[in-house]
Image (tube, grey):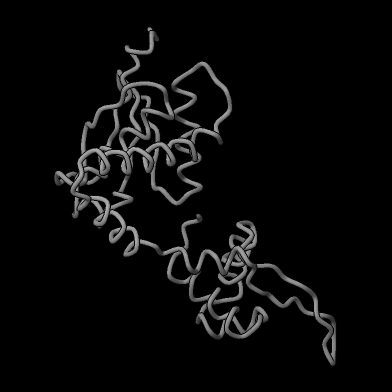
Amino acid sequence: MVPLDSKDRELLEHLHCHGGAYVQDLCDVMGVTRNAIRQRISRLEAWGLMVSEQRSQPRGRPKNVYQVTADGLHSLGEDYRELAVVLWEVVSEVEDAGVREQLISHVRDRLADRFRRRLTETSSPDERLDQLVDEMKTSGFNVESDHSAALPILRETNCPFPMLADVDEAICQVERQVVEQVLGAPVEFKRRCRDGYHCCEFEVQLESTGKT
C-alpha cells in the first residue's frame, strides 16, 4: 500500500471515471499548474498507479493521455479501516478465551511473516530494524528508526490503528509482538499514542540478543 493523499485519490478517480485524461485536463480539474500536475503524475507513475500512452491528434504532435492502472484502482479501494474495526470487534467478543487468543495469534503471526519474508539475512539487529522500517514505509506506515540512544527505537509518528486502539488496547500488544518476531529481539513500549503521546515508540532490547 502506498500513502495516497486526497489529491492523489481525486486525480485517480477522475482518470477512472473519464477513461483517461491529458495534462491540461488534469490541470483544469485539480486547479493547479502544469508543473504541479507533472510532479504528481511522476510520483503516481513511479508507484505504478497510472500510465501514459501517446495518442495522435488532428493537428500537431501526439499527446500523452494518462490512465489509472489496475494497481491504482486497487489503491482507491484500500481504505479498510471500518471493516478492520468490525473484524477486530468480532474477534474481541469471542467468549472462549482460548479461541480468542488463537485468532489473535494467527493475526500476529501473519503480519510478522508478511514483513519478515521481505527482509534480507543480516546478523545485525540494527540493520534489521532499518530494513523493517523501510518495509513498513512502503506499506503506508509513518515510521523511522532512531539509533541515537543506548537502545534503538522504532518510532511511529502516528498510530496506524487509531480506531482499533480505541476499541481494544490489545492491538497495541499485537503490533509490539509483530516487531519482536520480525527483529528476533524483545521489544518494549517506551511511548504510546494511546497514552497521550504524539508518537508510539518501540524500544528494542538488544542486551537480550547478546550484542554488546
* Quadrant assignment for the C terminus: top left
* Quadrant hosting residue 109: top left
Q: Is residue 161 left or right of residue 127?
A: left
Position in image of residue 176 (x %, y %): 30, 34
The answer to whether 210 is drawn above or below residue 19 in the figure is above
Instruction: Name the residue: 32% across, 46% down.
Output: 157
Asked if residue 209 is positioned above or below residue 139 in the image, the reply reads above
User: Residue farthest to the left?
Assistant: 195
Residue 126 in the image, given as x and y percentages of width and height? 44, 22
Image: 159 above or below 87:
above
Instruction: Measuring from the top left, give residue 116's x and y in whole percent.
Output: 50, 33
Indicate the quadrant where residue 153 lies.
Answer: top left
Q: Measuring 30% from the left and 22% from the top, which residue is drawn there?
A: 149
In the foreground, 144 or 36? 144
Specify the farthest residue to the bottom: 58
Q: Residue 200: x percent and y percent?
A: 26, 40
Using the image as rendered, state which of residue 206 and residue 114 is in the foreground. Answer: 114
Q: Residue at x 37, y 35 (%)?
A: 178
* Count of numbered labels shown in the rendering: 0
105 left or right of 98? right
